[in-house]
Image (spheres, rainbow, N blue to C red):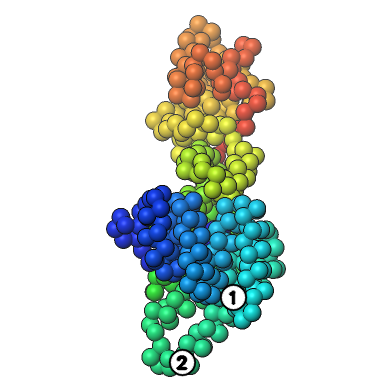
Amino acid sequence: MLIEHSSVETMTGSSTSTMADSAASIAGLMELSPKELLRRGNLRIEKCELKEAGRFFELALERAKSLRDSRSVSDSLGRLLRYSSDLGDETQTQKWVNELEIYLAQDDVKLTPQVWYCKGIVAFRNAQYKKAQILFHRYWREVEAEENALSKISGAMADLEQGKENLRARAQALLALGVVAQAQGKLKRARYLSEVILKYAEIERPRGILTAAYLMLCRIAERTGETAVARSWCQKAFAESVAEHNWYHYLYVLYGFARITRLEQDYVQARFFLDLLEKAVVKDEFRNLRNEIAEERVKLNLNRVDLEIDLNRSLVRTREGEVNLRRQHLLIEMLHQLALSHAQGLSKAEMIERIWKETYNPESHDGKLYYNINRIRKLVEPDQKKPQYLLNWRQGYRLAPELKIRIVKGETNQ
C-alpha cells in the first residue's frame, strides 16, 4: 500500500539527475547541506532511482554527523529507516532501528517529528496497525508542538515557507492515519480523513499529498464495491502523478487500475496493467511492490474467465484479447448457444435447430456449419490448426470443457 513519499520541491535541470561515482563528485556532494541531500534523495525516489536515493540519504547522515547537526541526524536516520522498509530489506531496517536506539541513548537528544512518521511507516508495513496509529498520532503532536514553538518565537511574522511545510506535515499525518484506518476496515473514518485532506490539498496542492489521498479514496471505493467511483479517483491520481513527474506514485496508479479492472471483470486489461508493472519493477529494490503485484495476480487468476461472451455489446473476450462481433450476430449467437450447452456440447442437428430454426439436412447445412465454425476459429483461436476454445465433438461441436466461461446478458452475468 502506498503512503506518500515526502518531497519538498520539483526537479530542476540536469545537475541532480545523476550521481557520479568519482571521489571528487562525492566530495562535492559533501559540501551540500544535509537538508539538500535529503531533498535530492526524495527526488530520486520520485524518479524510481531507489538505490541512488539510498546513497543520498546515507550521505546526508554522514554530513549531518560531521556538522554535529542533531536535527539532521535524526531526519536522516528516520529517512533511512523508512527507505529500507520500503525496499523490504529487513536486515537494513534493523540496522537503522539499532542506530536510532544508539542515537536516542545520547544526552540531550530529541527525535524530530519526521522520525515518528518513518517509524510509523515501518510498523504499518509489518501490519502492526495499532502501533502505527500511535506513532502517527505522535507525529501529529510533534508537528503541532513545533508549530506552536515557532509561533511564540516569530509571532505574527512566522516564516511563510515553514508554515506551509507544517500544514503539509499535518496533511501527511492525516493521510497516514487514514491509511491505517482503511487497513483496519474503518472505512468511514478513512473517508472522513481523506475529505479533510482534500479541502486543504486541492487548494494548496502540496507535492505528493494529492496523489496519495486520491489512491486512498480509490481503495475505499474498491472495498465498498463502487468500481466506477474507484476508477474516477484513480484517474485523478494518474493526472496528478503525471503532472508532478512522480513516477514512483505512477507505479501505484497502474497498480490501482489493475485492481479496478479485475473488479470490473475486464481480465484482459487487468493482465495488461500487471504485465506493464512487472516490466517496470524488475529491480530488487522494488521487492515490496513486486510482492503486491504477485498477490494481485493470484486474485486475478482465481477470478478470471477464459472466455467471456458479452451479448450486450456483441464482444467476445478470450485470454488473448477482445473480438468485436457487432456486425456478426450469427457468430456470437453460435458461441452463446455453445456456452449454454458447455457441459454436453451440441450436435450439428441441435445447432441448426437452435440457431437457424430449421430442421437439420446434412446436404444443405453441413457446409454452412463448417464455414461459420471456421470463421469463429479464425477470430478467437491463437492457432486454428490446434483449437483451444471451439472443438469438434462427436457429431457436432463444443467449447473446451476446462474453460471458465461467462455470458454477459442484460444487467446480470450467467
Point out the tag, 1 or 2, that comes first from the N-terminus: 1
Closest to the observer: 224 or 271?
Answer: 271
Relative to residue 304, is residue 328 depicted above or below?
A: above
User: Residue at left 65%, top 53%?
Assistant: 90
- For the residue carrying disc 2, how many other residues have a C-alpha within 10 Å: few (<14), some (14-19), or many (20+)? few
Which residue is denoted by mark 2 in the rendering? 153
**Contact check, label 1 and label 2, Cβ < 8 Å:** no
Q: Quadrant of the C terminus?
A: top right
Closest to the observer: 176 or 19?
Answer: 19
Relative to residue 324, is residue 27 depicted above or below?
A: below
Taking 50 as reference, is 107 left or right? Answer: right
User: Residue at left 49%, top 69%?
Assistant: 66
User: Residue at left 41%, top 69%?
Assistant: 33
Relative to residue 32, is residue 285 depicted above or below?
A: above
Closest to the observer: 318 or 242?
Answer: 242
- For the residue carrying disc 1, how many other residues have a C-alpha within 10 Å: few (<14), some (14-19), or many (20+)? some
Taking 180 as reference, is 283 left or right? Answer: left
Toward the top, the furthest residue is: 363
Which residue is denoted by mark 1 in the rendering? 111
